[in-house]
Amino acid sequence: MKKTILSLMLMVAFLPPFTASGQTYYDFALAEIAGLSSNSIIRAVNQTEAVAYYETATDNRLALIDLSLNVREIKLPRNIFVRDIRVSGTNIYFCGYKVNNQLMTSNEGIIAHVSYNDFGSSVVPLTYDVIDSNYVSVLYRLAAYYEPATQMDKIVAVGEHLYAPPATGCIGMSTPGPYICGQRAVLECDFDPNVPAFSNHTGVYTNVNVPHLEYVDEVIETDNYIAIVGFDKDEDAISIHPCPKGASILSSFDTYYYYPGTEYDGLSFFHGCVMRKDTIAIASLSLNTPTPTQLFETRIRTFDLPSHKMTTSQAVYLGTDKTEPLELVYMPHYQKLVMLMYFQFPPNQYNYTFLHLKPYSPVPYTAKGLYESGSRLPYTSVDRLTTTHYISTGGDYWFMKDVTIDAASTNCYKVDNVDINKVEIRQFVKKTFNYTPAIPGIDPKSDNLQVIVNNAFIRCIKQ
């Protein structure tokens, strides 16, 4: 379901209370920024600030927002669209695509950098690399971390290169996910903030070698690994590449692990997050009963990367309608997963819902779901701000929320119960495939961008 709406929503809560604009907020605060879009992304910079991306009718912007509702924005070129953001120290990286024509048939993937300090400058130097459209059309997930050996940041991104139309019927941009037209790609490069510039680019396609077809969807940074997650079409199963940090990701990419019996999990884009150390959680839309009546559910599984084991498995029953998870974040203090998803909740009413899942609890159990009733605009992104609080964005608000608060709010959000059931835990199979490196054409770019100051105002609070 797609919506074209102009506005932004970020969400967070803080205990003990924080003060903004002369008022005190306890449970959560909603701040509205006029004229923003539903296609927004948010990532925490530190425990009091977040960077968000949103699109207006006239331009696209990055916004640095703090708990006092101060907003400083960077105006991006109109033909650059962001699909993910990651923060490494004071360096902010994003990936997405650059539009070259109105038909969107020759888009180029991009990896870009701005500094945290740029949000206080009058002129912002944007450094970005354009990946030739003959190689990658869009990059949609990103990981970034500091590598002590090189004293540079390592960037790993996954994306897609569309086949040229009309040979396969592919026209324009397509939604990431299995069973669609397009070659999947994994790229890596380094960034030296002292230059500043990207370097040492390399990459592979994961579904170009027929009959081997693997559709990579997600990249997750843990303490010691970069995990590349996808769907192995040959085996009809979830696949995970646990690539150790400290070396080229692609040097260990040929060996990966798939999980037989997960054949009905490849119905949507895989979404994941790091939990503890080298444990990750993966969620996807799944087919519970293939025939005669198709019943769908969202499955959430956890994996230990060093041992390759699937450690827990849970399911949210959805019924006959296809809904899907959007993003996951783990709250270590309470050992809960917060999953943002589009959900039929309550019956016959669809909402963008935050489920507070307990991955280490015995199943079945009942989870709390926080949702917005009425005609509010959709949430699209969630991230962890502290060990106890998460943030979200989408629609026309930013929103801060304490993960332990489950009481319903008459002004903003409601809470209901969701049944969580068990899905069978699957054993891994090790697999090796010779991926042929394909180095993409790179065109370094730089622009000086405009900085804008925007003032948010309070829309709804609970005290």
Image (cartoon, rainbow, N blue to C red):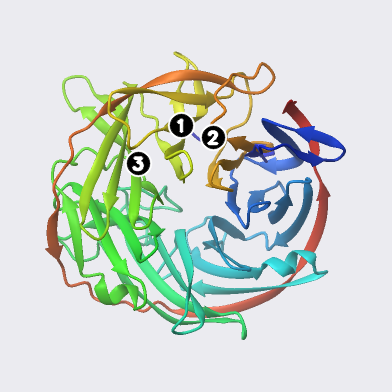
Residue 282: % across, % down: 34, 45
Distance from the alpha carbon under mark 2 to that under mark 1: 7 Å
SS at badge 2: loop
The disc labelled 2 sits on which kind of residue? Val
Front position in the image: 145 or 342: 145
Name the disc covering residue 403, or none: 2
Q: What residue sits right under mark 1 in the picture? A: 356
Please report whichever mark, 2 or 3, sits nearer to the chain's N-terminal start: 3
**Mark pair 2, 3: CA separation:** 19 Å
Does 105 sit above or below residue 362? below
Mark 3 residue element: strand
Quickly name the residue at label 3.
283
Q: Residue 277: x and y, percent?
A: 37, 57
Q: Amino acid type of disc 1?
A: His
Numbered disc 1: secondary structure: strand
Callout 2 touching callout 1 (CB < 8 Å): yes
Decide: is 315 above or below 230: above
Residue furthest out toward the top:
347
281 displayed left or right of 412:
left
Q: Is residue 426 left or right of residue 7?
A: left
